[in-house]
Amino acid sequence: MAEPVTEPAVDPALVARFVANATANGFTVHRGAAPLIEGAGVSVASYGLAESGSVVLAAAPDEPRANSLLPDVHVSLLREELILPGLPELFAALSGRLPSALAIVSGPSKSADIEQLLAVGVHGPKEEHVVLLPAAPPPAAPPQ
Amino acid sequence: MSSKLSQPVGSFRVIARGKLGDERIQGVLDLSVTRLRDLRLDAWSGLEDVEALRERAHEIRMRVVDDLEGYLDQFQRSVERLGGHVHRAGTPEEAVALIVAICERRGAKLVAKSKSMATEEIGLNGALEAAGIRPVETDLGEYILQLGGEHPVHIVAPAIEKTKEQVAELFSAIEGRAVPAELEALTASARRQLREVFLTADVGVTGCNMAVAETGTVTLVTNEGNGRLVSSLPPCHVVVMGMERVVPTLDDLSVILRLLARSATGQKLSSYTTLITGPRREGETDGPEELHVVIIDNGRTNLLHGRYREMLACIRCGACLNVCPVFRKTGGAAYGPVYSGPMGAVLVPLYVGLGNAPDLPHASTLCGACTEACPVKIPLHELLLDLRRDLVQQGVSPRWERVAFTLWSLAWATPFGYRLSTALARLGQPLGALAGPGKLWAAGRAVPALAARRYRDRPRG
């Protein structure tokens, strides 16, 4: 195979939009280094959505739902090349292959049910973190 | 008959009068309703072409109404292919019997519920309690109302009229110690109380914001995350879904979702949008092993063919409530225990028959603000006007009203009759004006004074 390996495309503008919108939703966004938080639930995100500042979590044998539901702090690991513009692109990317549960998380658990005042952490995590990871490196050339 | 939704003549007026006289509730309504309205307007203005999106949403929803049975069949096959079960219920009684049977078969003692207007509609909590099963609402607002033995007054913000102090009193009684009337303490208290429920519930019951026919997906939209907990932790998940809440494809779902949260709370998406596609799969360590979808009719097929079919497009966002000048003054309780505002005023009489909700078509000024706010472009105020016509044609409206309007139209059909009526009105006004039925109409309205001299009698030129 002499074809050059194409690097996964990362659109910096899309990443910037994701960071801005996720931060506005109440996510703490980290780049590169994951924070060490004791007792935090950790998920590997399937996708990120720039328009709504969301992380997309798909249930799987090694991605239990409870990881992102029960701990007080939840961390999502998201590769930058998996950031999509929005919902239409997400559903196109899934192309009908839906997991048993797909959670589109757009910030920490919140409620305005008492006097329309914003309360954070009613049921789910009180803190939501996203760690942005650089695009996966291209696979190494096979040894000659 | 769906007694949960029915309402006797005059009850709207009685409850509304109580709310109008309550200064605190007037303040709460003004603040919260206008806040939700402004949040929606802001969110809509952030969309590139909101009109095009609304048109698309309307088209999608009406395509479903045109072939509802076809899409429901497809949805059912998709769910069953994934190992889920689908049940159809015509009446509320059939629906609750199905759900109680599922709970009893599993030997359930505790049911965790996330907010669902469909379960309110069928009176599920009462039926579960009668069967010795304890239902617990987990949406914070619904939980507060359940503790107080009350019903939601807004489909999106159910406990909008409650104060921190009232909530603290309810929570203190549960915890057996004083919970301060502060937001943080109240939130922590609810978290403690409900966490236990999520972890020990035998069955989780949720509503369904929107289902997808091609994939068999049930979508839940919540901000608190209780919908996710209720559908993830208990071993059995029961979805209660109104029969019109389906869209053909995931692509169609994306259109509805882009409008739903923006119209309800001004968010681009709610904190948790969950797509559930079948029960737990092999190798997964959590998620329900058993998934049931109970599809309820409860009067919806009455709307399927005919003038009011567009009402089945409703996505329950509450935007029409937040712009309605009547709702803003009366709040939700006057409309009955489940649906309120313009959407409720249209929907309830259609579900239960005009004779069982005769006040509701009149709970509107016909200003059209609801139609303008509706993300799926339902002509709500036109439907309300048509319902008023039906009230007369079906003989539901009172006899005096029909006689009065017949006399009025006879009088104003001739110039002489018109002149006579305005002259008589001028005589009548100083005498205290409206008596009998007219007085009832004028109560709560500011009746304008007539000019000293009629316009037609003014000197010309």
Image (spheres, rainbow, N blue to C red):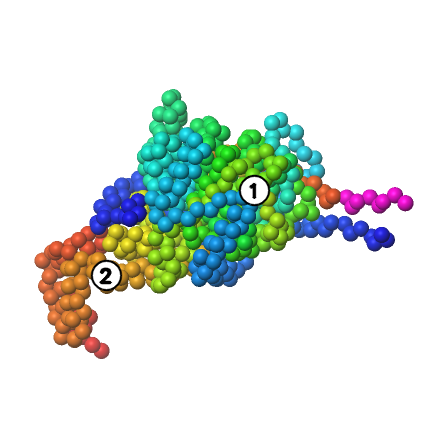
Can residue A28 be seen? no
* Residue highlighted by disc 2: B394
Disc 2 element:
loop
Which residues, given as a range, are shown in magenta?
Answer: A137-144
Residue at (72, 44) in percent of width and height: A135
* Residue B280 position by quadrant: top right
Residue at (52, 37) in percent of width and height: B288
Where B200 sits versus B360, above or below?
above
Judge left or right: residue B351 versus residue B275.
left
- Camera-side residue: B321 or B138? B138
Q: Residue furthest right?
A: A144
**Marker count (numbered):** 2
* Protein chain holding label 1: A
- Camera-side residue: A105 or B138? B138
Q: CA distance from mark 2 to mark 1?
A: 48 Å
Task: Please state the horizontal and vertical placement of residue B153, each as a whole percent of the image.
Answer: 34, 43
- Camera-side residue: B449 or A55? A55
Q: Residue furthest top?
A: B177
Where A69 sits versus B262, above or below?
above
* Protein chain holding label 2: B
Q: Is residue A142 magenta?
A: yes
* Residue B137 position by quadrant: top left
The amino acid type of the residue labelled 2 equals Gln
Judge left or right: residue A4 versus residue B449.
right
Where B149 sits versus A38, above or below?
below
* Residue highlighted by disc 1: A101
Q: Residue furthest bottom?
A: B461
- Camera-side residue: B239 or B31? B239
Task: Please state the horizontal and vertical placement of residue A46, each as a whole percent of the image.
Answer: 64, 43
Can residue B104 be seen? yes
